[in-house]
Amino acid sequence: MISGQPGAIVLLGSGETAPNAQKIYHRLFTQLQDDVRVAILETPAGFEPNSEYVAEQIAGYLRKRLQNFRPHVTVVPARRRDGTLSTDNPALVDVLYDANFLVMGPGSPTYTVRHLQETRAWHVLRAMNRLGTTLFFASAATLAMSRRTLPIYEIYKVGEELHWKAGLDLFADFGLSLIFVSHWNNNDGGDVLDTSRCYLGQERFGRLLAMLPEEPARRIVGIDENTALVIEPGTARCTVQGVGSVTVCQGEWQEIFTAGTSFPLEVLGAFRLPEGADGIPSDLWQAIVDGVAASRRRRLSSRVPDAEVLALVEQRGEARQRRNWVESDRLREEIRALGWQVQDTADGSHLEAAE
């Protein structure tokens, strides 16, 4: 079944495999109310020779630290726009149809933009979110979701002049103009060098802000390390999770939201939900809807009831033999709550996976 509202969009300041992240994942997995099916997209680190290792670090963390959820984790090696491992390759990208939790993490924000923008992977990712899938972005991927992104490697590592690059602008779909800054409170430089504001420091970041064109609707969203901003489009609410804070700025106005607090999505601007396939090629949108539905049918057909479900079915059969219809109906609902439904026919009762 396809969800009637978009999934959550999670932006992590840093620490996707840090001990503190376990509680964040736990809350998010609990909210899925379904088997946890994670797909990790390699694109942000696709330029690195060990990009598979980077993604597998996240996969291993989820399998070990969140083992109670028994997550099914798949790494999708879509690394660049061209070649066999392309972000436009349906054989790779369409694996995402089966996921209800999509992850992108560390790497380069500008590389992420270049190799995702207007590709099949980018359209599928956005469409899946509209169909109920949670999107989880960390560090470089968080930066890339901005309308304009920080070319942090180019400035901090290479020494290029201060400038902005176009971002993927994920939240344009929701009527918002947002610039995300991960590692907002970084202090790796100690007393010697200000490395806050994603390693650039407050002085250089202030000069970068002055370079932006006037746009009254724009918000700057700073996300501390080991901290997540969880945006719920369906309820129009935002929650801060983790150990730090989220800072929202608009011109001279600034507000800081500490961990555990919730605030209306309208703090980020004039929010609206996208209309169906808005901004996604119509033929691809239909293919995604059909692909998600087909994936669900395959999962349902391959499911096997566990011992608890089978025991309840047996109890219900005994209740029906006693003509205890109240108990029979109660057990039917209990079975239904475990994801199964009982069909009573002239040939007897049959168990099916619930939609």
Image (tube, rainbow, N blue to C red):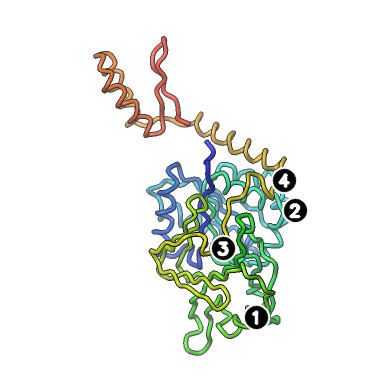
Q: Which three-letter amino acid code belongs to the residue tagged 2?
A: Gly
Q: Local crowd at mark 3 within 10 Å, few (<14), some, or many (≥20)? A: some
Earlier-in-chain disc, 4 versus 3: 3
Residue count near mark 1 (Cα–Cα under 10 Å), binned few <14, some 14–19, many ≥20: few
The residue at which mark 4 appears reads as 281
* Amino acid, disc 4: Pro
Residue 67 image point, x, y percent: 40, 50
Question: 177 or 36: which is nearer to us?
Answer: 177
For residue 269, the mark is 3
**Residue 341 picture location, percent across and down:** 41, 26
Q: Amino acid at mark 1?
A: Ala
Secondary structure beneath label 2: loop
Neighbor class of circle 2 (other Cα within 10 Å; few <14, some 14-19, many 20+) is few
- List the residue tagged with mark 2: 83
Q: CA distance from mark 1 to mark 4?
A: 36 Å
Image coordinates for residue 340, horizontal then vertical, percent: 41, 29
Which element carries disc 3, helix, strand or loop?
loop
Q: Check whether the beta carbons of the residues at disc 3 and disc 1 lie within 8 A of each other.
A: no
Label 4 environment density (alpha carbons within 10 Å; few <14, some 14–19, many ≥20): few
Say which residue appears at 29% left-offset and 16% top-offset.
320
Dot 4 falls on a residue whose secondary structure is: loop
Q: Are marks 1 and 4 in contact (CB under 8 Å)?
A: no
| Mark 1 or mark 4, earlier in chain | 1
> Which callout, 4 or 2, points to the residue nearer the camera?
4
Identify residue for label 1.
Answer: 210
**Could you tell me which secondary element the residue under label 1 belongs to?**
helix
Query: In terms of depth relative to the viewer, which is nearer, 214 or 327?
Result: 214
